[in-house]
Image (tube, grey):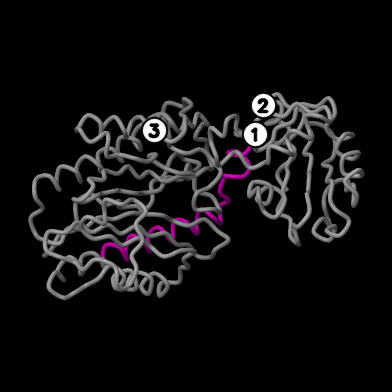
Amino acid sequence: MIDQGELQEALAVAGVDGWLLFDFHGLNPVAGRVLGLTGMNTRRLFVLLPRGGEPIAVAHKIELQGLEGFPGRVIPYARWSELHAALETLVSGRRLAMEISPEDAVPYLDRVPYGVVELLRRLGATVVPSGALVSRFAARWSAAEADDHRAAAEILASVAREILAKAVDETDAGLSESALQARVVAAVEGRGLVFDDLPIVAFGANSAKPHYEPHPGRDAILRAGDVMLLDLWAGRSRSTVFADQTWIGFAGSRPPARVALVWRTVSEARDAAIELIQRAAAERRPVAGYEADRAARGVIEAAGFGDAFVHRTGHSIDRDLHGSGPHLDDYETHDDRLLVPGVGFSVEPGIYLAGEFGMRSEVNVFWAEPGPEVTPGEPQVELIVAGS
């Protein structure tokens, strides 16, 4: 459970009477992260963290084991009428924060089903979004998670550099995307990290497909002049914070002017977003996720590639690779949540030219105690080219 003093302060700032956490079959990862409960989750669970008084859980009678040691009162139910009665005593007349997002504006916050909100409102609750609480208590990394992330970030960067530096010279060797993917997996796992999904390896025109997946027998073979995109994410375990990076190579020694221009634009856009965040931190002024997206997008638009940047600049990272905290986004959504100390996120602008090639440069940022920290320590500056 989270620190009660800090929670009380946050609830007061948010102007709510409490934070009502709901989960059912793992629908709401925020609840799992905040509560840290174990055991089965096949029935509706509600936990009220009030602005004053002890926490209260409303849990089904067959799933009370996971609440052993709960630091508050547990109200068991079995019948639906018992559930409704318990909830009414809990919520009536109260203004409560929950994981909702009006009009689904930010899907990563919209974790509570409409019917649950409808029920609570009928029982007398005023339900409001919990975005600031999620950022502060669910998306924030622990010291151990930050250390895990840093270690994973350096391993991924080392593997990416080494493998791409070798692969860019293999234009006559029949190297396929899936074969290079297998090399990456073996190298990363050999360094002690684990994946939750396979990395993206894309050659040539396939690199212009942001979420491309290679398949043996149907994937591309590396040709001279191909752009090579490697997007890889892994961590020390599946229950900690991963690192997530994208690296770019070129199968040749002299990239054409258009390739060089796109790389320069993407890397400058990445750096513009980071500089905005670091400057705001140094000036001790608030900065929201959408502002960083605008900074990166402005660079790409000024270079004439605005229509080819078709996703947000970055996503939250917590124990979920695409986490519940603030995203760098004023494109897919307008994420006005503040970037706050303790959270982490990717910075990954991209340009995708259909039928030609695509590039994305991705690093991560963790807002550590001294300020925003970029991982890996040495991000990609130049294209990885043949003979380098």
Q: From the viewer's perspective, is 143 left or right of 381?
A: right
Cα distance in 3D space between marks 3 and 2: 24 Å
Residue at (48%, 62%) from the top-left corner? 235
Residue 14's mark? 2
Which of the two residues, 24 or 150, is positioned nearer the viewer here?
A: 24
- In percent of width and height, residue 255 lies at 10, 53
Q: Provide the residue designation for mark 3.
A: 292
Q: Is residue 207 above or below residue 3?
A: below
What kind of element bears circle 2? helix
In terms of sequence position, does the residue under pointer 1 or pointer 3 come before the other? 1
First to last magenta residue range: 133-161
**CA distance for labels 2 and 1:** 8 Å
The three-letter code of the residue at mark 3 reads Ala
Q: Of 271 and 184, which appears nearest the observer?
A: 184
Q: CA distance from mark 1 to mark 3?
A: 22 Å
Residue 51, percent from left and from top: 78, 31
Residue behind mark 1 = 130
Q: Image point 86% across, 60% down: which residue?
A: 62
Residue 160 lies, in percent from the top left, at 30, 63
In the picture, measured across the screen, residue 354 lies left or right of residue 100, that is: left
Question: Viewed as shown, does residue 208 lie left or right of 226?
Answer: right
Q: Quadrant of residue 319?
A: bottom right
Residue 186 bears which disc, if any?
none
Magenta region includes residue 154: yes
